[in-house]
Structures are given as structure tokens and as C-alpha cells.
């Protein structure tokens, strides 16, 4: 997990360097440096991130509050999460145990450490796994670990998939999850019906109080069946009333006021959003010992209720939240924000050097 997350961070930093930026004025530079200097002495080396976010910042007075991606991943995220402990439960095959009593996608077949299991965690053969899956018209199959960015997701339609093709895929990995395809609520399906469009919410626990930092909707585009931005999808912010904001963005920072398939974003209500927030609040206690900074992914079922898809316990993506909604910690008071940053800076997480090495390697590649 740690190595793949570090690679993902490198890729995100590389993509951001290729994205459009808006040069900082002398006044903006001064304000940024004055705010950050007491917290992070090398902030001048991170000004490129403020140039990037300057392209999306409507209220320029708030620009100094944006968190550079490099600082977020290598310092803040590490302070509020525990990636080493997260390894042991960052497995979709464990969700039915950890999140019992919560509506999840129905898992038909699992593969854990090379062993095929049914929905009740009982060993089965490949032939039995095939029979179980063929009782559904189609299934979604994915790696149960290290599956960020939609990596490794496949849809099997058994009217066109041969038995041998499916069994060969079962042999391709030791960690797999095969689930029933979700039927999503019409309010999200009308945006893009080919993909399951999900709500991502970031929460932060501080001194016993849970803060909802940012929420976005991730949407597929064209014929894509997944909504991940790294797979060509776009992302739009959600306001406090549960409605979409005016613009959505892709991984290059390009923006749309309406979906390429026609839906206009501004003011569109997202059914079930407030229930998603309440669901996240009810679950944080189960994993607070592993992470206080969590990214939750929910789908909305046809009945309007949340379906928990994934929980990102470490290295949850921050850039789209800040592009769509502004500074990630803007919901906090200025005092709380400074405290969050200061405490993170003073910590000495053993993985900080690893992440910083990844960032330095990417800088070196860019310079050469």
C-alpha cells in the first residue's frame, strides 16, 4: 500500500506541474509567505502549488489558506492517519466485517490470499465461483487491495464473457472482490448513466469533534463505466445544502458548467447527500484509531439511501476538493487551521522521509 500510494502521489504531482497555473502577484506572494513562514520555513519552494490553485480561487484573499499537495501528503495526512495500521484493514474483503450493519455493495465472491470464498467467507472452488457469478447478468470485479483510481476494475457480462475467460481472470490475482452491480438513484444516473457516480466526503476528527471538510461528486464521461478522474472522469463540488456547484473539473484542471452528456451542474440537488454525511459521522468511531482524516465514497441507491463503496484511510486525494471547494481546512477557524498545520509540522512520522523522497524524485525528473 505504502509504495503504491507514494507512486500515486508522484503521478499527481507530475500532472499538477503540467496543469495550467496563474502567476502570483507580489502582494499574493507576500501574504502567502507571511502566513506560512512561522509554520513551514521552506514555503517559498512550494509557491508553485499556490500558482496552480490560483486558477481556481475565486476569493483571492483565501489563496494563502490552500494547502500545497506536497505538504498535505508528506506531513498533514501522515499526522492524522496511520498508513502502517491501515494496511491491515485497507481490504474491501473485510468491509462486511468492519462495517457490519451498513449498506454495502453485495459481494458474491471474494479471493483472499489466494483462497476463493463465498459471501459468507466459506471456501469455494473456481467452478462454484463461476456458477455464483453467472446467476447475475453482470458483475463488477476489482482488486480488493491497492485499487486506487479505478485500477483493475472490470465488468463481466456473462452473455459475452466465456467461462474460461472469467476463470483465467480469477487466477490473475490473489486479492479480488466480485460484487453485484449497483443500481443508482435517478438523480445521479441522469448525469451519466453508464457509470456509478459517487459522492466523496472528507472528514477530520479534532478533539472529539468531527468536521466535514469537503464533499464532491465524481462522474464518468462518455462510455466510461467508472467515475474516477484518473480514468477520464470529472468532479464537481457540493455545497452545504447538498446541491452541485457551478463547475466540474477534470484531472487537467479543465472545467465544465455542464456535463459533456448535457446535465447542468449549478444548483442540481444530490439525493441522499445529507444521509451520507450522517452515515460517515456514525462510522468514524470504528476506525478513529487508524485515521482521523478519512475520505468516504458513497453511491446512492434507487431508494435514496447511501451505499458505502470505499473508505480511504490514508493519502486520500486533496487536489480536486481544493479545486472545487476551496481551501481544504476553510471550515475550521483560523486558530484551528493553524493548530492543525502546526501540530502536523511538529510531528516526526517515520514515513515522512519516504514521501518526501518521492516528491524530490519527481522534481528531479521535471528539471531534467
Image (cartoon, helix red, strand yellow):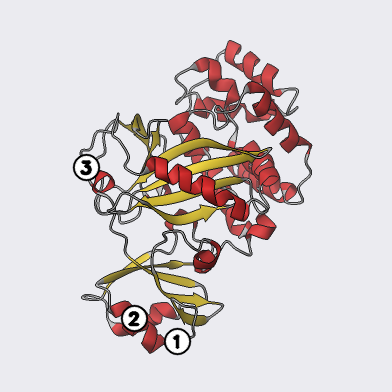
Residue that carries the numbered disc 1 in the rendered image: 124
Q: Is residue 20 visible?
A: no
Rounded to the nearest angstrom, the CA distance separating label 2 from label 1 is 10 Å
Count up the numbered dots. 3
User: Do the residues under discs 2 and 1 have CB atoms within 8 angstroms?
Assistant: yes
The answer to whether 122 is drawn above or below residue 30 in the figure is below
Q: Secondary structure at mark 2?
A: helix
Residue bearing mark 2: 132
Label 3 Cα crowd, 10 Å radius (few <14 / some 14-19 / many 20+): few
The mark closer to the camera, 3 or 1, is 1
Judging by the rendered image, the residue that carries numbered circle 3 is 261
Q: Is 59 located above or below residue 11 in the figure? A: above
The location of residue 241, given as percent across then percent down, is 38, 31
Return the disc, 2 or 1, that comes first in the chain's sequence: 1
Relative placement, left or right, of 84 versus 294 is right
Which residue is depicted at the point 76% across and 47% down?
A: 349
Instruction: Compare marks 3 and 1 and give the one earlier in the sequence.
Output: 1
User: SS for tag 1?
Assistant: loop
Residue at image position (20%, 38%) is: 262
Q: Quadrant of residue 43 in the image? A: top right
Judge the density around disc 1: few (<14), some (14-19), many (≥20) Cα neighbours within 10 Å.
some
Amino acid at each position: 500500500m505504502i509504495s503504491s500510494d507514494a507512486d500515486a502521489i508522484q503521478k499527481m504531482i507530475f500532472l499538477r506541474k503540467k496543469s495550467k497555473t496563474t502567476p502570483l502577484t507580489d502582494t499574493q506572494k507576500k501574504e502567502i509567505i507571511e502566513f506560512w513562514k512561522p509554520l513551514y520555513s521552506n514555503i517559498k519552494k512550494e509557491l508553485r502549488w499556490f500558482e496552480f490553485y490560483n486558477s481556481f480561487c475565486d476569493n483571492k484573499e483565501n489563496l494563502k489558506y490552500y494547502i500545497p499537495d506536497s505538504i498535505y501528503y508528506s506531513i498533514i495526512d501522515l499526522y492524522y492517519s496511520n498508513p502502517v495500521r491501515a494496511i491491515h484493514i485497507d481490504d474491501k474483503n473485510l468491509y462486511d466485517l468492519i462495517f457490519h450493519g451498513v449498506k454495502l455493495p453485495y459481494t458474491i465472491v471474494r479471493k483472499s490470499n489466494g483462497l476463493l470464498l463465498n459471501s459468507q467467507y466459506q471456501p469455494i472452488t473456481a467452478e462454484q465461483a463461476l456458477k455464483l457469478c453467472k446467476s447475475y447478468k453482470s458483475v463488477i470485479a476489482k482488486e480488493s487491495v491497492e485499487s486506487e483510481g479505478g485500477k483493475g476494475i472490470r465488468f463481466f457480462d456473462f452473455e459475452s464473457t466465456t467461462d474460461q475467460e472469467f476463470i483465467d481472470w480469477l487466477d490473475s490475482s490473489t486479492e479480488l472482490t466480485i460484487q453485484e452491480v449497483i443500481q443508482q438513484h435517478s438523480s445521479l444516473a441522469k448525469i451519466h448513466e453508464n457509470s456509478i457516480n459517487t459522492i466523496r466526503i472528507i472528514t477530520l476528527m479534532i478533539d472529539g469533534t468531527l468536521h466535514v471538510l469537503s464533499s464532491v461528486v465524481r462522474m464518468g464521461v462518455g462510455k466510461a463505466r467508472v467515475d474516477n478522474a484518473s480514468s477520464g472522469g470529472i468532479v464537481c463540488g457540493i455545497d452545504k445544502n447538498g446541491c452541485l456547484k457551478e463547475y466540474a473539473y477534470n484531472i487537467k484542471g479543465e472545467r465544465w458548467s455542464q456535463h459533456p452528456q448535457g446535465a447542468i451542474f449549478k444548483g442540481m440537488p444530490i439525493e441522499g447527500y445529507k444521509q451520507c454525511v450522517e452515515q460517515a459521522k456514525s462510522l468514524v468511531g470504528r476506525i478513529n484509531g487508524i485515521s482521523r482524516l478519512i475520505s468516504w465514497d458513497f453511491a446512492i441507491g434507487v431508494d435514496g439511501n447511501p451505499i458505502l463503496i470505499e473508505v480511504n484511510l490514508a493519502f486520500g486525494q486533496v487536489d480536486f476538493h481544493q479545486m472545487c471547494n476551496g481551501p481544504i481546512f476553510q471550515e475550521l477557524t483560523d486558530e484551528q487551521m493553524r493548530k492543525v498545520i502546526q501540530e502536523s509540522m511538529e510531528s516526526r512520522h517515520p514515513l515522512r522521509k519516504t514521501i518526501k523522497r518521492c516528491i524530490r524524485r519527481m522534481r528531479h525528473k521535471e528539471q531534467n
